[in-house]
Image: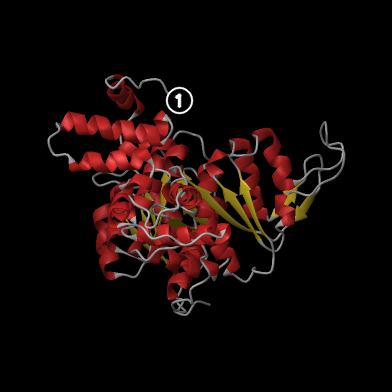
Amino acid sequence: MRSSDRKDSILAVDDSPATLELLQRNLAAEGYVVFTAANVAEAIKILDVTPIDLVVTDLKMPGLSGVHLVRHIRENFRDMEVMIITGYPSVKGAVEAMKTGAEEYLVKPFTDEELLSAVARTLNKLHMRKTIHRLPKQKPVATDGLVGESPAMATVRDFIARAAHTAATVLIFGESGTGKELVARAIHYGSKRISAPFVPVNCGAIPGELLESELFGHIKGAFTGATETRAGFFQTADGGTIFLDEISETSLAMQVKLLRVLQDKEVCMVGSGRTRKVDVRILASTNKDLATLVEKGLFREDLFYRINVINIDLPPLRERDNDVILLAQHFMKKYSEELGKPVHRFSDRALQILRKYHWPGNVRELENVIQRLVVMTDEDPIDAPDLPELMRFSALGHGNLNRTLVEVEAEYIQNVFASVKGNKTRAAEILGIDRKTLREKLSRTGKSRSR
C-alpha cells in the first residue's frame, strides 16, 4: 500500500453519456474513485478542487478538445497522468497527444480488459515516478567521464542517482557524442545490479538481418553459418543491464520482439520454438525524436511507451557553459598521463576559442581535439595557433565587424558544413533549417556536392 493509503482517483471526461457511464461502472468496479465530466470546462473545475491521479479523456469534444485538457494538466499539475480515448484514431492524433503529455492512447471501441490494462499501466508509471521523487536525495553514483559543473549536468547527475535506485526502464536522449553510454554505465554501476554484467549493444552498427541473432542467440543449424549454438546479448546480461544504444535504428520487426521481451521477460533463440526467462534491466538511447518517428511509422508507439518510463536528456556541449574548459583540462590530464607527457596549460586566447566553438561533435569531438594536441604539441601553454584551423578561422571571423550579414552567414554555414564532413542532414540539424534551404545556401558558395 502506498504511503497515502488512499485509492487511486480517476476523472473520466467525454461528451458521450454512454461512454461516461461505461467508464464509471468499470473503473468503480475495480476499486477506483471515479469522477466524471462532460466537457473540458467541467473537468478543469473538478481538477481545481479534487485530488486526481489519472484523467481519462476523449480526444474530440465540442468546444475545447482533449489535447487542450492535456496541455492544461501538464502546465498546472505535477503528479497527474493522462490517458486519451478516441473514436477517431490517427497516427497524427496519437503523436500530438504523446507530445502534449498523454501517457496512453486507447481507440474506441475497446474491451473492458483493454481499458483496465491501460489504466493499470498508466497508474503504475505514475506510482513509480512518485516513488522516485519521494526518495531522499541519493548519494551521487560514480559518473566517470561525465565531467562538468553546469546546472544542466547537475540535473543529469540527479536523474542518474534516482534512476539507479529503481528498476525502471530508462530512455537517454542526446546528440551524438554527448556521453549516453557513460550515463547508462553510471546507472548500472550505481544500482543493485552492480555485480552483474553491463552489456552495451550498438543497434545501428549491427546489420538488421544479424541483430536478432546477436540479441537473442541462435541454435546450431538455425541458418547458414550457424555451426554451433550461441547465447545472445540478453542471455549474457541475465541478472544485469543491457544498453540498447541508438534503439531508433532497429527495424519494426525487431521492435515487436523487443516489446515482447519487455512485457514477458522472455527471449526465444533464433531457430528455437522454446522461450527462456531472463532478468534484464533495459536502458536505451537515441539521438532522434522518437515521437516524430512514431508519426512517420518508423517506430512503434507501444514500444515508445514501454522504454520511456524515465527519460534523461543529455545537453549538447554548446549548452554547458564553462564545462568545455573543465572537460578540456580533464582530457589534457588523461592523455598526458597515458603518453607520459607533461600536462600543458591553455592560453587565454586558446580558452576563448574553445568556449566559442559550437562543437557539433560534442564531448567526443572535444576529446579528439585534446588528444591530438597532447600528441602533436610540445609548447606550453597551448595557444590559438595550436588549435585546429577550422576553430581558429571560426573564432577570427566573429571578431570582424566590417562584414555584411550575408558574408557572416555564408562563412558560418561553410564552417558547420566542413565540421560534419559534408553531411547535409547533420549540417541542416545544427543550423535549424531543412535540407532544401541548406542546398540553396550552399549552391551560392559552390559547395553543393555532399551526402
Q: Is residue 442 visible?
A: yes
- The image quadrant where one finds the C terminus is top left
In-front residue for pair 71/406: 406
In-front residue for pair 424/286: 424
Q: How is the image coloured?
A: secondary structure
Q: Which residue is drawn at the image coordinates 35% and 38% (left, top)? A: 390
Tell me the residue that label 1 is attached to.
Answer: 451
Q: Position of residue 144 (x, y in %)?
A: 52, 64
In-front residue for pair 32/333: 333
Q: Position of residue 364 (x, y in %)?
A: 47, 49
Q: Which residue is drawn at the image coordinates 21% and 34% (left, top)? A: 408
Judged left or right of residue 160, residue 260 is right
Q: Is residue 245 above or below residue 198?
A: above
Q: Which residue is drawn at the image coordinates 47% and 79% (left, top)? A: 5
Q: Is residue 268 above or below residue 133?
A: above
In-front residue for pair 231/273: 231
Q: Position of residue 23 (x, y in %)?
A: 44, 56
Badge 1, how many Cα within 10 Å: few under 14, some, many 20+?
A: few
Q: Position of residue 258 (x, y in %)?
A: 63, 47
Where disc 1 sits, the SS reads loop
Q: Is residue 183 visible?
A: no
Residue type at numbered disc 1: Arg
Judged left or right of residue 53, residue 181 is right
